[in-house]
Amino acid sequence: MEGPPVEVVGQEQGTGKAPPSAVKDVAFGSTAGMIAKIFEHPFDLVKVRLQSQPPHLPARFTGPVDCFRQTIAKEGFLGLYRGISMPLVGAAAENATLFFAYRLAQDSIKRGTGAPANAELSLGQLGVAAGAAGAVASFVLTPIEYIKCRMQVQMLSFPTTSTSTSPSAPSKPPGAIPLLFSTLKTHGARGLWLGQTGTLIRETGGSAAWFGTFEAVTRFFLRQPPTSPLSSSPSSSHPGEKRTKSDLPTWQLLLAGACAGVAYNVVCFPADSVKSALQTSDELGGAEKKGFWATGREIWKGRGMRGLYAGMGVTIARSAPSSAIIFGLFEWMMGTWG
């Protein structure tokens, strides 16, 4: 997941503060997500290439470091940013959809339980709201990730000038727009949602883990007594008022965001692996199309548990700082322009 924006509770109890506008939530969250995407894209490319290795063929890469090395050697440093156009679009679309749906889901839970609009939901209720928002966002993300994943593995099967024997062979692989129209022509609009099951599982469970972990960590810090070294400094608090996330020091928000990023990816990583394998089968010359569960069984049979978690290490390495970047930037923009 690419990482969703920071959840900011509406009107906090005891503060009298008006809730930030949904427009600012979406704008700041989308901006933070796009900036974080620039940092994390090389790691995501390596993850997808590791996940997409056909289980019936010898592994092309021995691990993340080898994948980085081969990519730079054959495609140059900019090769690590292949396919970044779609993730940038996806970061904006995901954050806008996810945060808007998350806000609506929280409002629905409050209305359903008879809670006041400024009530603080429990972690379980926030998890339900986040899971519902992730499910909605998955339908926006799947077409974007489908094109992105295909672009990220193109160079693994694209013939180079030295190996191509056809004078009419294209000099470079197609970009996002040609791939989009090619998919529509070959498979119809439905083809863009190949891998939807995997995205749905990943986004539903991952979003619940993401928001839930962030809330759990920040609430832990907010519960610390003033004398605790983990407590925010008294000068940053509002005397006589309940402390909120805005009272936490930057390092605690960044740590909470990093923990959330790790939780998001750990929860449903095998589903993401199966999704990547499905979405890149055309580029890598896969056999006949299989469904989500059939592809999962094939990966398990060919590579076992290791195949389902291929790229997990590099994903954790990028998800923690990336999520921290999103939280840090969002809070800074909200404090500056909110």
Image (cartoon, rainbow, N blue to C red):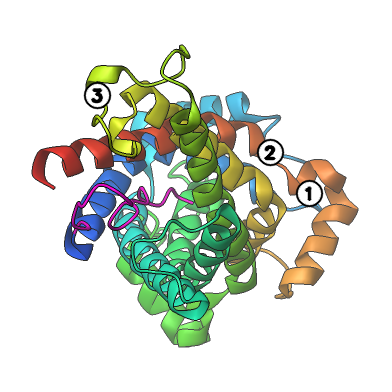
Camera-side residue of 33 and 12: 12
Residue picked out by circle 1: 57
Residue position for label 2: 60
Sooner in the amino-acid sequence: mark 3 or mark 1: 1
> Which residue lies at the image location 60% right of the left edge and 42% below the top edge?
263
Where is residue 135 shown, x and y percent of the image? 53, 71
Hey, what amino acid is under mark 3?
Ser
| Residue 251 is at least partly visible in this image | yes
Tag of residue 236: 3
Magenta residues (range): 1-20
Residue closest to the eye, 177 or 129: 129
State the residue lying farthest toward the right: 301
Secondary structure under badge 2? loop
Tag shown at residue 268: none
The picture quadrant where one finds residue 326 is top left
Is 106 left, or right, of 96 in this rendering?
right
Rendered position, 262 above or below 88: above
Mark 1: secondary structure: loop
- Residue at coordinates 25% horizontally, 47% vertically from top-left? 15
Please state the horizontal and vertical placement of residue 320, each as a whole percent of the image: 49, 32
In the image, farthest residue toward the front = 240
Q: Secondary structure at mark 3?
A: helix
Mark closer to the observer (3, 1): 3
Mark 3 packing: few (<14 Cα in 10 Å), some, or many (20+)?
few
Residue contact at pointers 1 and 2, CB within 8 angstroms:
yes
Q: Are marks 3 and 1 in contact (CB under 8 Å)?
A: no
- Residue at image point 34% right, 29% down: 248
Q: Magenta region, mostly helix, strand or loop?
A: loop
Q: CA distance from mark 3 to mark 1?
A: 58 Å
